[in-house]
Image: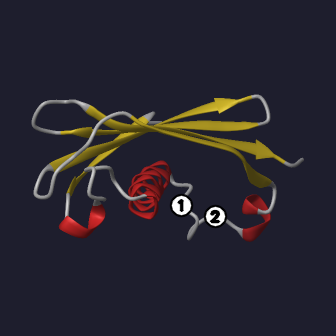
Amino acid sequence: MKPTHSRAYRVRRYDIDPAGRLQAPILCRLLQETAGAHAAELGVAIETVSDRVWARRELAELDISYHSECHHGQTLVSISQTAETDGGCVVRHQIARRDDGVVVALARTVWRSLT
């Protein structure tokens, strides 16, 4: 099992607000796309797992923190890391600027088992 996955994204002008922060819907999309690709790599993509499995898990927590700005044309690297826990899993996300490694945002999702 590969515990981490990364993807690169080029910042479009409409991805950021006037202060250079990723807009919340864009940030969530980047997190979701990276986590989805990671899940597919692990063989548990939503498209391949039965509805019964997904019905037994729920998103229990979502924490997002912004740390730095980014700019139009920069490339960001989104990394997800998954760890199994008792009764679920935790996915840690990091989005950083590729050119200097500065963290733009961090997020953590906690998935709880309902069984």
Q: How many marks?
A: 2
Q: From the viewer's side, name the closer residue of 3 and 109.
A: 109
Q: Is residue 25 left or right of residue 85?
A: left
Label 2 crowding class (10 Å Cα cut-off): few <14, some 14-19, many 20+?
few
Q: Which mark is residue 65?
A: none
Amino acid beneath label 2 = Val
Q: Which mark is residue 45?
A: 1
Res 12 → quadrant: bottom left
Percent across and percent down for residue 55 are 79, 63
Residue name at image x 14 percent, y 58 percent = 72
Res 68 → quadrant: top left
The answer for how far apart the CA atoms under marks 1 and 2 are is 6 Å
Q: Which residue is mark 2?
A: 49
Percent across and percent down for residue 2 are 42, 36
Percent across and percent down for residue 14 are 26, 69
Residue name at image x 81 percent, y 55 percent = 56
Q: Callout 1: helix, strand or loop?
A: loop
Amino acid beneath label 1 = Ala
Q: From the viewer's side, name the closer residue of 67 and 88.
A: 67
Tag 1 and tag 2, C-beta contact below 8 Å: yes
Res 33 → quadrant: bottom left
Q: Callout 2: helix, strand or loop?
A: loop
Residue placed furthest toward the right: 115
Residue name at image x 75 percent, y 53 percent = 58
Q: Is residue 63 left or right of residue 106?
A: right
Percent across and percent down for residue 36 are 47, 58
